[in-house]
Amino acid sequence: MTPDLLDPIFTCLDCRACTTACPADVDVGGLIEQVRGQLRQAVPLTGWKALVSDVFLKGIFPHPSRLDWLGRLLKWYQKSGLQTVARKTGLLRVMPDHLAEMEAILPAVGTPVRRKYKHQPLIKAKGETKRTVAILTGCVMDVMFSDINEATIRVLTHNGNDVVIVPNQTCCGALHVHAGDRETGRKLAKQNIEAFQHVDHVIVNAAGCGCMLKEYPELFRHDPEWHEKAEQFAAKVEDVSKFLHDTGFKPPKAELNVRLTYHDACHLAHGQGIRQEPRALIESIPGVEMVAMPNADRCCGSAGIYNLTHPEMAQAVLESKMQHVPQEVELISMGNPGCMLQMALGVMKHGRNQKIVHTVQLLDWAYQKEEGKDVRI
């Protein structure tokens, strides 16, 4: 257990690009995560790293109620004027540079859909119901990007789907497994498998979460009972873009008239093999001009919490990514919240006036405009 082994394993982005490139189709990403689990058992975290892991990965993310309170605190920080004071007075300078930069691009915190629909767990389809689906609300997604969850619900109901908000769901466990904490990952997996056992479709709008859910069987390779349950569960999991594409979504009629480019989230393109479906959804919107991004499936450097644990390396990866983002576009679209934060950081640092959007938001705006609503992009 020397640095020669530890450094390469934990410095890896786990972006799965090597799996895509491998002619023998070796699941390198899965091997990396297995090794991380073994190394973390042999060499546990100590000091401040152990404290951060215990507080956030074990103490907050697995508990939706605690995440909700964290979201309320962030919302108060943004609405109370404290955020403005902290930025104007330079108070944020006491933080490490990469954390201060992340604070600068935090989105406005809304109301989590789990709380909003607590007493209305079934949102009916518009018109005839074609099928009933459940959505993974997620942890970071529902706290930081509740507007995307709202957009996902509207798009699904617009296309004839009743949407269920399953109450007992929890964090997917991706961050834990990436960090080598496979035991916590298994606990979260069991909770989700049981929570979604009575639904036929589990729709996910976060690439990293979707990839993790589909890989639950790997966590239970040596547990026949739970491996079978995990296999049945994984077969239900579908990324929202692929689900809409495969079930025949309604092409929007209203024009958006924007120029945009598309970034392939690693765990969508390399992890799930989903590339064309999101592009097909975007290209179906009248007035949208798609500008191809060279090396669109290169990692942006987010990689879960890699931009927090390896800020210098993540910044170098982001710099490389930004060199390929077309400057003439107004929007940069993608399907993963971690990528959205990282790419927003890149736009800010390069002084660009580009907006980061989720693919499903584009459809939602077009549908709303079609209904005569005022849409501001």
Image: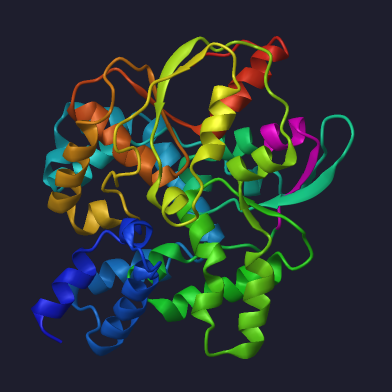
State yes or no: residue 164 in magenta. Answer: yes
State yes or no: residue 328 in magenta. Answer: no
Residue 351: where, in percent of width, then height?
20, 21
Residue 119: where, in percent of width, then height?
77, 48
Drawn side of residue 294 relative to residue 204, left or right: left
Which image quadrant is residue 259 in? top left
Which region shows up in magenta? 153-166
Say if 65 sits above or below 284 in the image.
below
Residue sitting at 52 percent across and 68 percent down? 215
Residue sitting at 45 percent across and 81 percent down? 183
Which image quadrant is residue 308 in? bottom left
Drawn side of residue 92 relative to residue 215, left or right: left
Q: Nearer the viewer, residue 203 or 30?
A: 30
Residue 336: where, in percent of width, then height?
45, 44
Drawn side of residue 343 relative to residue 221, left or right: left
Residue that protrudes farthest toward the right in the picture:
128
Q: Quadrant of the N terminus?
A: bottom left
Q: Nearer the viewer, residue 273 or 241?
A: 273
Residue sitting at 18 percent across and 39 percent down? 320
Query: Can residue 180 be seen by looking at this rendering?
Result: no
Q: Nearer the viewer, residue 251 or 144?
A: 251
Say if 97 sits above or below 200 in the image.
above
Q: Nearer the viewer, residue 283 or 130?
A: 283
Residue 61: where, in percent of width, then height?
46, 62
Residue that protrudes farthest toward the front in the picture:
23
Query: Can residue 127 be seen by looking at this rendering?
Result: yes
Say if 274 sits above or below 46 in the image.
above
Query: In the rendered view, how is the structure colored?
Result: rainbow
